[in-house]
Amino acid sequence: MTSVHDEIGRLLDDAGLRYTPGRRALIEVLARRGPSTLPEILAAAPGLTQSSAYRHLGELEAVGVVQRVPTPGDHTRVELADGLTGHHHHLVCDACGAVIDVELDTDLEAAVETALARVAARHAFVGERHDIDLHGRCRSCAPGPSGAASPTATRRRS
Amino acid sequence: MTSVHDEIGRLLDDAGLRYTPGRRALIEVLARRGPSTLPEILAAAPGLTQSSAYRHLGELEAVGVVQRVPTPGDHTRVELADGLTGHHHHLVCDACGAVIDVELDTDLEAAVETALARVAARHAFVGERHDIDLHGRCRSCAPGPSGAASPTATRRRS
DNA sequence: TTGCTTGCAAATGATTTGCACTGCT
DNA sequence: AGCAGTGCAAATCATTTGCAAGCAA
């Protein structure tokens, strides 16, 4: 596989940036764990500094390699951009902040796309990308049987 | 109209809170302007203090009267909860942060709901509420003819 | 060498909170 | 009296940024 790395390398290069080991480490963490917060990224990538990680995310977002995932909680969550991983949506746990990637039926996507285009036009709004996410409780945070275990944390300051 | 205010008053009362003029002012601003940031709320509601406004939003959110709207930018945007205004979605301008409320076709909503329920089940996820939003450029921020005017501001720190 | 990288420490700025006081009930 | 509301000022904490040193082209 001419893997995603080549693609990323090219995107960075086009912007006059280098695909350094630091950035690569960050990307690999995102590829491995999916939507993550900065603390999570730092924990998964020993050697990365907080400031550098933030800086990298900013650059990578600008270049279109990573994108923010809207979630509750104090930390911004980021993931590899749709363009690299394929279009998908999210199941967001409002209790622990966890995010699960999911894909929807093509026909449905098309229907949503069409409907949004219609309302957008009505407001002279130029649409670029749609988000669809389901908020609720993940397996670990849901009440009842299954996992009454400990949520992965990440709540608001209380 | 037994207006939304009664409903809100009841919700607050159930939580042992009072529907004070300060809270009412905040609600009225949201009802009037739709999704707003705290600075916008303060500007529209003379007499409200920043700390009180933040506190009110926290309580009102907990009681289910207001909800956060996921948007880019530094300030959290809030609006009256779906339960009070009717289910709707958003057109989010990534340039100025403006948010426009829109409603989608009932059939489409149902289809999305069904599809999400299916994937949620697959992940033992308990869904509660779905969000659908279209990101792009609002009339004022879109390039080209129409309004090459000044965006309503509100960007990231740059 | 010229410019992109980065670590460290200091700065920013949105949001939260402690405390004291006012006002319902 | 007893508890909720609220302003003010101080505290927090995620995120950003200045600066100086390291490295690749």
Image: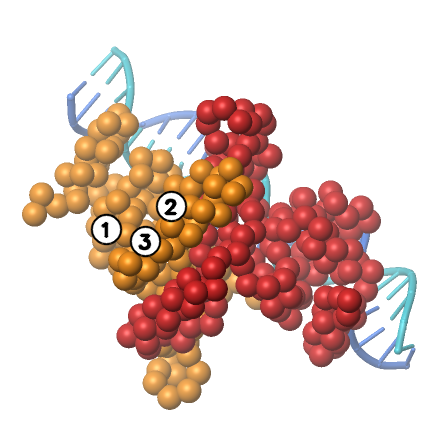
Chain colours: A orange, B red, C cyan, D blue
Tell me the residue at 42%/42% (across/down).
A127
Chain hosting mark 2 = A
Task: Tell which of A27 and A63 is nearer to you.
Answer: A63
Residue marked by disc 2: A129
The kind of residue on which mark 2 rests is Arg
Tell me the residue at 43%/65% (across/down).
B107
Chain hosting mark 3 = A
Tell me the residue at 45%/38% (across/down).
A126
Q: Which label sits in the foreground, 2 or 3?
A: 3
The residue at the far left in this view is A1
Labels 3 and 1 within one chain: yes
Gap in angstroms between the C-alphas marked 1 and 2: 15 Å
Residue marked by disc 1: A85
What number of labels is visible? 3
Chain hosting mark 1 = A
Residues under numbered marks 3 and 1 in contact, where contact means CB atoms less than 8 Å apart: no
The residue at the far bottom in this view is A145
The kind of residue on which mark 3 rests is Ala
Residue marked by disc 3: A110
Q: Counting residues from the N terminus, which is met first, the one under dot 3 or under dot 1? A: 1
Task: Indicate the position of residue A141 as horizontal and vertical percent values.
Answer: 41, 76
